[in-house]
């Protein structure tokens, strides 16, 4: 009798719990307010595109022509450098040792040449008076010429190792700022690391004037004109904006790359890349950030 009473009660309790769970889970949650309002075009008719900020010199990947162990680093992240300033250097002890040998070889060749010329200066007056043969005189002239050739070779080898010593120090190719620093003291660095698929040892760029590389959908590319005005808004804060000046087209239309990493972003299209510039000034905008860009264009 007890079993016949308990089982229906347990069934009713299970049904009640299921109904309560369904009703409680069906409640609508309030939508969160966006972090920043979406920017709006300041032009009556425009083409919109996503852009990424880059250095006006483009982002330059710095490597080394000579592999070796890093001995010194002269800059830090964010350092401003001038063209020709040292960035880092490779251990150069072996090159300095070779250079010392070549300098000693130059000194030895100079002594040999001086000795050959002195010997020749003694025999030339004697040949004119018949005290020595022409063959003996020619032999000493050849010895002097050989000594001159050996001296030129020694000096060329010295210059070669001086150039190698200079190449051990990697220098800035232009005025700019160190954007990334991936090199460390005591670390072995290969030559042309970036070409081998590794990150650049140093990323350098000119940042007083910045560029924005804007992806324009190929369907709207025909509407964008050279010299068109544009306005850029920093992604995530539309209050940070700046007018943009047209620089150039990248005339080769390329497949679009995902900038946001969002799975809903379309990448099954091709884009025309348009380069704009702006003066950074006090704007809190950094290389690598995204911008929403509106380009003044005629109506489609």
Image (tube, helix red, strand yellow):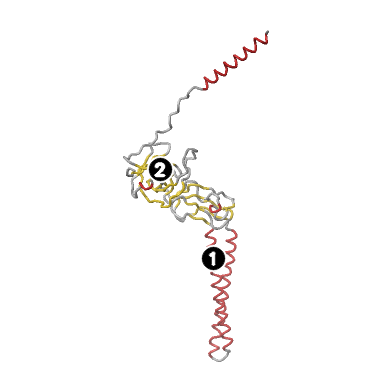
**Considering only vertical position in the picture, is 253 above or below 1?**
below
Using the image as rendered, state which of residue 88 and residue 271 is in the foreground: 271
Disc number lying in front (2 or 1): 2
Is the residue under label 1 in contact with that under label 2 (CB below 8 Å)? no
Q: Residue at x 49, y 40 (%)?
A: 261
Is 256 positioned to the left or the right of 8 in the image?
left
Mark 1 falls on what kind of element?
helix
**Considering only vertical position in the picture, is 147 above or below 100?**
below
Mark 2 falls on what kind of element?
strand
Place of residue 255 in the rendered image (x, y in percent of width and height, measured from the top left)? 46, 47
| Labelled disc at residue 11 | none
Using the image as rendered, state which of residue 87 and residue 204 is in the foreground: 204
**Considering only vertical position in the picture, is 289 above or below 165?**
above
Using the image as rendered, state which of residue 34 and residue 28 is in the foreground: 28
Q: Residue at x 36, y 37 (%)?
A: 40
**Badge 1: how crowded within 10 Å, few (<14), some, or many (20+)?**
some
| Labelled disc at residue 160 | 1
Is 218 positioned to the left or the right of 126 in the image?
left
Residue located beneath label 2 in the image: 49
């Amino acid at each position: 009798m007890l079993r016949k009473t308990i089982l229906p009660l347990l069934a009713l309790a299970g049904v009640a719990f299921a109904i309560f769970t369904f009703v409680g889970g069906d409640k609508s949650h309030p939508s969160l307010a966006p972090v920043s309002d979406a920017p709006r075009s300041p032009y009556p008719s425009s083409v919109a595109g996503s852009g990424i900020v880059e250095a006006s010199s483009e982002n330059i990947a710095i490597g080394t022509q000579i592999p070796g162990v890093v001995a010194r680093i002269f800059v830090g992240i964010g350092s401003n450098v001038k063209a020709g300033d040292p960035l880092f250097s490779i251990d150069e002890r072996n090159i300095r040792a070779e250079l010392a040998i070549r300098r000693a070889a130059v000194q030895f060749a100079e002594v040999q040449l001086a000795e050959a010329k002195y010997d020749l200066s003694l025999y030339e007056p004697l040949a004119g008076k018949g005290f020595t043969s022409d063959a003996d005189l020619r032999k000493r002239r050849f010895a002097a010429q050989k000594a001159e050739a050996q001296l030129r070779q020694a000096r060329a080898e010295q210059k070669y190792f001086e150039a190698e010593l200079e190449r051990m120090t990697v220098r800035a190719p232009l005025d700019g700022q160190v954007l990334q620093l991936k090199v460390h003291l005591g670390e072995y660095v290969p030559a042309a690391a970036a070409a081998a698929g590794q990150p650049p040892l140093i990323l350098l760029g000119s940042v007083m004037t910045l560029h924005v590389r804007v992806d324009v959908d190929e369907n709207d590319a025909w509407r964008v004109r050279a010299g068109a005005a544009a306005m850029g808004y920093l992604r995530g804060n539309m209050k940070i904006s700046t007018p943009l000046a047209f620089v150039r087209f990248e005339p080769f239309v390329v497949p679009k790359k995902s900038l946001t990493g969002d799975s809903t972003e379309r990448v099954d299209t091709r884009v025309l890349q348009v380069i704009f510039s702006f003066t950074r000034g006090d704007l809190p905008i950094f290389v690598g950030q995204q911008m929403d860009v509106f380009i003044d264009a005629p109506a489609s």
